């Protein structure tokens, strides 16, 4: 049986709005941390940052079906609600919004947000409908909760740029904050999908961060971007990954870059090891 907690869990938009409205009417700031659950230290970092910027933190927990392709891991996505509520409560979250699929997508729902700009290429080349699902659910969550700020991890860097652009384009009255990636001691970026890694793949997985770090250092020393990216691809492949993409992009627009003269550079990778697909990125 679920134990009694200080964190309040609500399942409807009406309850969410009523609470947030009450806080904001008292002149208190509200931060939203949208998640799909399976919370880890990376999510806790978002909540901790939120606490510095707002009086109240709301976490949403919703495994959004529309951002998964039919071939992807929706049904086996980890569901750990009780543990998630414990972690959120410990991190100072007061309200958890845990809608079911019908609350988010009632019968007759037909709207999808379609984006170009930072949503083009990279993930979209491999998951063509992913960002339409993310943009639509995040727009809904921001409109439902009406927070002052919303926090997202830099781990999903393309997602962060997509959401920043979305909020700007739709004039959503919210400040989007990106929070640096939390890593294991060996450099592996924390992800809810790391639980899928077998022992051997887990041991090989830090190669992603090692390769990006070496490439970023080489580019900073004046090395050509193309050569540094090629060396990173070779390192990641040798470690046993199958690469979807490993590229240097403009850090804000995510347009391809060939030199540091083209603007701030971000290295981004997605690669599979065994059956698990990991993503990571690093600033140059
Ligand atoms: O990053 C995630 O967990 C999800 O993509 C998000 C932003 C909660 C939307 O479902």
Image (cartoon, rainbow, N blue to C red):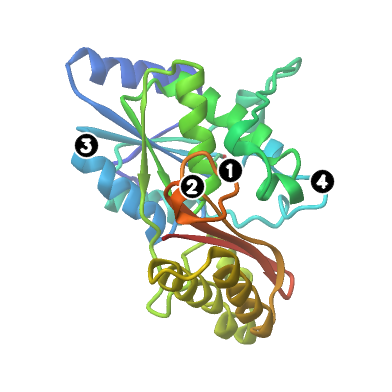
Q: Cβ–Cβ below 8 Å for labels 3 and 1?
A: no
Q: Earlier in the sequence, mark 2 or mark 1?
A: 1
Distance from the alpha carbon under mark 3 to that under mark 4: 38 Å
Q: Earlier in the sequence, mark 3 or mark 4?
A: 3
Residue 262: x and y, percent? 48, 47
Q: Is residue 8 left or right of residue 68?
A: left
Image quadrant occupied by the C terminus: bottom left
Identify which residue is drawn at 64% across, 28% down: 115
Tag shown at residue 200: none
Q: Earlier in the sequence, mark 4 or mark 2?
A: 4
Q: Earlier in the sequence, mark 3 or mark 1?
A: 3
Q: Cβ–Cβ below 8 Å for labels 1 and 4?
A: no
Whether 31 is drawn above or below 190: the answer is above
Distance from the alpha carbon under mark 2 to that under mark 1: 10 Å
Tag shown at residue 53: 3
Q: Is residue 133 left or right of residue 268?
A: right
Q: Is residue 2 visible?
A: no
Which residue position is annotated with label 1? 255
Distance from the alpha carbon under mark 1 to that under mark 4: 28 Å
Which residue position is annotated with label 4? 70
Which of discs 3 and 1 lies nearer the camera? The answer is 1
Identify which residue is drawn at 38% across, 62% down: 182
* Ligand 1 under 8 Å from disc 2 Cβ: no
As rendered, which of 266 and 140 lies closer to the eye? Answer: 266
Tag shown at residue 262: 2
Q: Is residue 42 visible?
A: yes
Identify which residue is drawn at 65% across, 23% down: 113
As rendered, which of 18 and 260 lies closer to the eye? Answer: 260
């Amino acid at each position: 049986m679920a134990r009694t907690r200080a964190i309040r869990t609500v399942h409807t938009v009406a309850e969410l709005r009523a609470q947030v409205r009450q806080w904001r009417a008292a002149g208190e700031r509200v931060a939203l941390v949208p998640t799909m659950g399976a919370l880890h230290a990376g999510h806790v970092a978002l909540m901790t940052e939120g606490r510095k910027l707002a009086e109240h933190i709301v976490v949403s927990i919703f495994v959004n079906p529309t951002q998964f392709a039919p071939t992807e891991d929706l049904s086996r996505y980890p569901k750990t609600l009780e543990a998630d509520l414990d972690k959120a409560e410990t991190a100072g979250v007061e309200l958890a919004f845990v809608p079911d699929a019908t609350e988010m997508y009632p019968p007759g729902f037909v709207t999808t947000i379609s984006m170009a700009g930072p949503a083009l290429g990279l993930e979209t080349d491999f998951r063509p409908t992913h960002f339409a699902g993310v943009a639509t659910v995040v727009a809904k969550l921001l409109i439902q909760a009406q927070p002052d700020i919303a926090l997202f991890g830099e781990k999903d860097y393309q997602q962060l740029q997509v959401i920043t652009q979305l909020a700007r384009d739709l004039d959503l009255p919210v400040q989007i904050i990106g929070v640096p990636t939390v890593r294991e001691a060996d450099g592996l970026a924390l992800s809810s999908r790391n639980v899928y890694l077998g022992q051997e793949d887990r041991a090989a997985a830090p190669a992603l961060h090692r390769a990006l770090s070496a490439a970023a250092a080489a580019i900073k020393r004046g090395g050509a971007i193309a050569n540094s990216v090629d060396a990173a691809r070779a390192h990641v492949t040798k470690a046993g990954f199958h690469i979807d993409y490993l590229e240097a992009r403009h850090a804000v627009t995510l347009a391809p870059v060939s030199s540091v003269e083209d603007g701030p550079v971000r290295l981004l990778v997605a690669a599979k090891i065994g059956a698990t697909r990991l993503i990571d990125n690093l600033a140059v």
